[in-house]
Image (tube, rainbow, N blue to C red):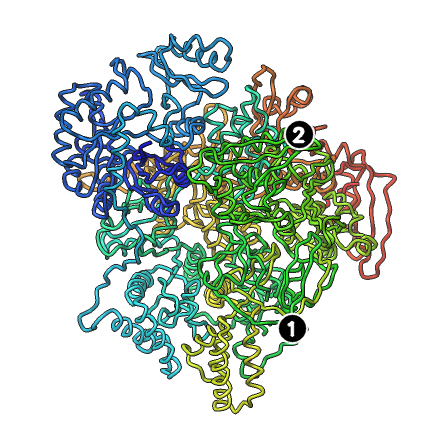
Amino acid sequence: MPVFSHLHSHTQYSLLDGQASISGLMKKAQADGMPAVALTDHGNMFGAFNFVAEANKYNVKPIVGCEFYLVEDRHKKAFSREKGERDKRYHQLLLAKDQDGYHNLSKLCSMSFIEGVYSKFPRIDRELLLKYHKGLIATSCCIGAELPQAILFQSEAKAEELLKWWLDVFEDDYYIEIQRHGLMNFDGTGKSQEDVNQVLLGLARKYNVKVICTNDSHYVEQTDFAPHDILLCVNTGEEHSIPVGDFQTNYFRLISQDNKVFYDHLDNLRPLAGQDAHIRRQLQRIDEEAQAPRPKSRFGFANDQFYFKSQAEMNALFADVPESVDNTNEIVDKITPPKLQRDILLPNFPIPPEHANADAFLRHLTYKGAFEGEKRRYSDRTPEIEERLDYELRVIETMGFAGYFLITQDFINHGRNNGVAIGPGRGSAAGSAVAYCVGITNIDPIKYSLLFERFLNPERVSMPDIDIDFDDVNRQRVIDYVVDKYGKNQVAQIITFGTMAAKSSIKDVSRAMDLPLALANDLVKMVPDQVGTTLTKAFAENQELDMIRRDDAPDNLRGQILRLATQLEGSVRNTGIHAAGIIIAPDDITKYIPVSTSKESELLITQFDGKVIESAGMLKMDFLGLKTLTIIVDAINLIEKNHGVKIDIDEIPIDDLKTYELYQRGDTIGTFQFESEGMRMYLKDLKPTNIEDLIAMNALYRPGPMQFIPNFINRKHGREAVEYPHELLEPILNYSQGICVTGDTLVHDADTGARVRIDELADRVGSFRVQGVDAELNPAVAPITRFFDNGVRDVVKVRLRDGSTATMTPDHQVLTEAGWQAIGQLAPGDFIAAPRQLAVENEADYDLDKLRTLAYLLADGSLTSGACCNFVSNSPALVAAYTASTSTAFENLTVSTLQQVRDVTRVSVKVAEKGYYHEPTSLLAWLRELGLKTQKGGLASREKFVPEFVFGLNQTCIAHFVAALWDCDGHVGAKICSYKTISPLLARDVQTLLLRLGLRAVTYETSYHNPNDEQPTTAYQISTFQLREFDALIGPHLVEKRRQYGAKATPATSATVSRAAFVAELRLVWPGSNKELMRTHGFDRQHLQPTRLARNPRISAAVVAPLTRALPLSVTERNLRVRWEEIVSIEPAGQQAVYDIEVAGIHNFLGNNIILHNCVYQEQIMQAAQIMAGYSLGGADLLRRAMGKKDMKKMAQERDKFIEGCKNLHGIVAKKANEVFDVMEKFAAYGFNRSHSAAYSLVAYQTGYLKAHYPAEYMAAVLTNNMGDIKKVTFFIEEARKQNVAVLGPDVNESILKFNVNKQGQIRFGMAAVKGAGEAAVEEIVQEREKGGHYADIFDFSRRVNLRAVNKKTFESMAQAGAFDSFDRYHRRQFLEAPGNDQSLIEKAMKVGQQHQAAKESAQQSLFGGGGGEMAIPMPKIQDMEPWSPTEKLRREKEVVGFYLSGHPLDDFKLEIDSYCTCGLDKIESYKNRDITVAGLISNVLFKTTKTGHPFVSFNIEDYDSSLNLALFRDDYTKFSSIINPRNYDKEQVPPMFIRGKYAQRFRDSDQFEFKIMTMEPLFNVAEKLANGVRVQLDLRTITEPFMDRFMEAVESAAGSKKLEIKFAEPHEHLAVDTYSRRYRIEPKEFIRKMREMEIEACQLI
């Protein structure tokens, strides 16, 4: 069979037109033995870099191409409909032959965007082709190309004429391309695709042009047709049910119930309707559309033949034109794949002629910035500073990075000099003194002991990474400078690719399938909100969602949607622009990479994303916008305006007492980095007194080891001793308050899933990435940065309750709920952390039949002797499954069965057609590759293991493999799912595979005597109790044994947390009693009893989890993110070689599926060597590396050098120097990255300083910079009020565009935040006020402002927001309403203003200039009317402000809410299956009808903090709909409601809950109905005769029917007397109102 390669292939980067993933194409090509594949996406090269890399990984030759849009004139972008003009685009395939061809292809693609883009199509023309055709291969392309279109719609002669042009340009590199997709009767021409092919073949023969065959591949497998069709609907926004076809030719596409695709004339399709309801519905829709004046059809592919066909399929399809297959190989042979990866190319920075080169100029700028001028960095020129600068400059010169520093300092200094606020630095760049001196950073690394080696390491040459923060308002000015300096053709932003995530894929498919929005939203809500959630995980976690997916009934539309969404999940959906990344090229960027354009930016956009752009040789700079810097700038401007003080934020005192008092109170809401609840709690304990405290806390809390925070706090306050190896080291260790595993430890590879022995990682430093946890115990991935061989040490073997084991030194640290602790400090019964799931970044796919074969052989196969690889089973179903899978997966096999005793069947294989005598079967050869068989034998049962590749497969493959194991030796029971084996390796492997699926398993061991074996046999049982998850993930793949589990199945997990730690944290955040906790949050108080703690020190995670959503239990919530496993034994294990690694950032990793700490050799080691032994920085770095590598020879030399240095420099004796050197070797856990922490702690301190000294101005700046987020504005207004800073509504006489501070120190609402005001109008109002003074009244306002800028809408919005309230003659209602037919105050004021401005303009234009003064305009009469009610006033305020500013409509009912409501709406999830009462405002009442014709109503209920959407159906509709119908109330305003209901399961056995209403009534009735009376407390010290007279007057004026209780109290004497009135009865709410008038607050309903 001739070899064939696909030369016309689309991927997901043909946005919403291609569905194939690049890896999917490569896997199929490799499996099919295809030598090469071409990438030809529509109009772009987005996927080219990844395509070449992926192809190389699969040993497939990559051919980079593009299917361009060819037009007559790429510059023409205007078309006249009247003249019948349209943008006629033809498809044109071009392939790059070599590197020159790639550059020209890239240039064409770039120019198609830069010059040719029209609508959404990038276009080229012949002019560009003539210019850039060298090194390119062209074909006649598909049916949409120029030649086929000429054949269809013009003539064969025209096609021949066009062909000649292509041959003249491309000569032997032009090919006729034919495709066969069975397309018929194009646009009524009567010509089919095959007709076109025959003409093309004739032209090929006539002009001796070679022919190739292709398939217009848009998806990988034929079965991917359905999701691809949905993708097209997402692209066009059309419903899937719209017919695909042509009403002119009557050719249509139909899909049967079993997903077969038919494309033919309508007359030939109608007979198919017989037994297929699905086809009948499609025909009915076609007939309905045919009756319409303009029948509607949608874009769709005619059939399911547009997939990545195999070589055999292509050979069969073009058997009559065999040369068309052969000729694909000619093209493949012509291709030399381009090299797209290169070293980074720096742009040329202009060097002044007096400096020899970039290094000399950088040295000049460094020393000038360090020691010259008013703003010199250092006042004293010391040898230490010079040594530091010279060392750094030498390293920079050696590494060739001077140009990078010059480029960076240039645009940063330009920004600083032009009013752009720039951060002091971030990350390790803050450790460079050169960067500090030339202005790149603004923090002194020498002062803060930050080391340069963290930033640039001469031993590891890689581009420095300097991320710069700019204030987000002025960031663009710096980017503009870079564009102006280097040219627009050298600067580009970076493209991003948006993909269809779990929820968005459901939304997109639902929209295409026309599922009602409410039902679609219900499906979406069933998917967890966790970041990175996939649909596979969602199905495992939500049984109801999984049941919907698995229900394949024809009428289950939701199930179809979920299945399609699963197939489309992860598809590229759209492009975007990276928020910060900027590329600067050496010259024209199109010489290096393809670029595109976007309506969202004036800059060019790269076609490669940020993950690969640097690998493509481009210099990437991150221009990060930091809102905090804008807040600082705004606050400083307000302070200068209000106080006349110009603050230089870089010069504020770093030891300000008032600022540290703010941190000590934890009063840091609104400040940078320190405002989280957990951080504020720690600050109150720490009581920071210097900047080092803040640096340490910032490093420890984020992202450092939080577990050390209590130690740090205790050491600061003297509660824990701080010991230094030598007093000389105190200066470098005091800011941190001054603290290995065996080689067979398996480390989880986060990229591939493989388990790698730790002693094999020495050569993989920098490239190997591990899974661990971050500071919040979320799963995290990071590379290893160092490897340590720690020699032979005493070790212990640790065994956990789940059967996991690890062998380590006693001082190696593991994670406990109390923090990182040495394993030697723990004992059996203690708990340590393990992951909830093993993640793999690059999951692979695999042949499921091969996986089943492998699993069956591992479970019940005979692999011991010779060529034997037999499967044995007594299950006919398993024998059939094994036979089918093996026959399918392996070539040239004959499968035979042999019936043995006890109904056992043995299945064996042999070579069907031998090429030589000892030829092994393809199955045997594969098993040998996997290490399961050898030339002479194989594995015994107790030696079996799972090959390493399986651990890196995707979840579907792993589930399929595990299910096959379970088919043979597994048990699926009512209370447990278990698997048995006698192989310890296989047991460990199965447990790990279950963890890959997120299933916890426990391994049990039992021993028994085997008569055939002298030694006892150990059996291993791997058991999981997560029954429903097991069924959801693995159940669908089981051949036998599947069991369905209901909602009442055994609880999914046995996860626990420390009861004592939980209770301790709960006591901090819950001030009430246990009983109140139970009543408010439904938490059973029995869990808090001391006896329960003594009896069971652990508490179920499922019990505490709901409470973490209701209360700020940050530590408990964090601890729930991992699994805590009990230690069952710690036993000495002799001496063994031990190893360790350093992990960047997170400093921990998974070893044997346990979370283990790593070594952290940090700045302090190098500084210790410097201070004690006189090492240079370079020498100290060599010492650090020697320690890291455990180079014993080098270490011995360094020890001698260190001891000698200590003696010569400080007279330290050898014994002490040796002790210090030993400590330096062991030092690990307490180091942290100071550079990033110091830089950001400085910014944080600046915000704390401003808040402490100028709280009003600072909070106004915070509010201004959060104006777009109503929730944050509300939150920060509340915070300002806690600071005793009033926040007032907008006022035309005080407000400006942003939030402002008035002379009384009160914050005024920014007028730009008022909806409908308009920024131009606000600027006009402010400018006029600054010019002419305050506005006297509304008429003065209307006369003075420009009424073209300040229109009626602005007037109305301002009035509703209260901006005219300072004109106290009128109230808000008068501005907008008027009685009878009168005009409103706004209308009258605007009329006066218009008359005044017209008269003024007329006078100015008069020949004599007027001279008679202003014309007197009579003031209109304004009629009195009742003001709006408080509720109406607040409602209108919210319309234009977004929230209630001057109050809340529920304030009048706060007493009822506090007395009778169970909880707020945001807390109802804590009250599952319980009766509760809530109250709130009613809005968005919508009366609708269901599809079955029944009425229902939906509405929102909203309280102070949250809102809830509810719906009433059937009986509930009958009972309650009238109560919430706006038409039944004055002004259609539904009053606040009091609702009693239950938060219960939506359906039986459902994981979804909803609030079911039981009773509902207006809130104003509640006090009268439920209150028995009022209890008021009177202070005996305040009771006087006048007081009692007023009190009795209030009692009598509030007469009613409820009782009055009075409690007389004398707090100091602890006296209290309860009384009640027999004579007086009161109306509760009126009485309480009267009490508040008397400033008596101690009232409550009874």
Residue 800 higher or lower than 1380, as above or below: below
Disc 2 target residue:
1546
The quarter of the picture where the N terminus appears is top left
Q: In the image as oriented, which residue stretches furthest toward the front?
A: 917
Q: Position of residue 540 (x, y in %)?
A: 60, 38
Q: Is residue 180 left or right of residue 859?
A: left
Sequence-first disc among 1 and 2: 1
Foreground pick, 784 / 916: 916
Q: Amino acid at mark 2?
A: Arg
Residue 1442 higher or lower than 1059, as above or below: above
Q: CA distance from mark 1 to mark 2?
A: 53 Å
Foreground pick, 1124 / 288: 1124
Res. 538 visible in picture: yes
Q: For residue 620, which quarter of the picture? A: bottom left
Q: Position of residue 1250 (x, y in %)?
A: 49, 63
Foreground pick, 132 / 200: 200
- Tell me if mark 1 has few (under 14), some (14-19) or many (20+) residues whose alpha carbon lies within 10 angstroms of its own: few
Name the mark on residue 717. 1
The quarter of the picture where the C terminus appears is top right
Q: Position of residue 1471 (x, y in %)?
A: 71, 39
The reply to whether dot 1 and dot 2 touch (C-beta < 8 Å) is no
Q: Amino acid at mark 1?
A: His
Res. 1590 visible in picture: no
Q: Is residue 82 left or right of residue 291?
A: left
Residue 1594 higher or lower than 1299, as above or below: above
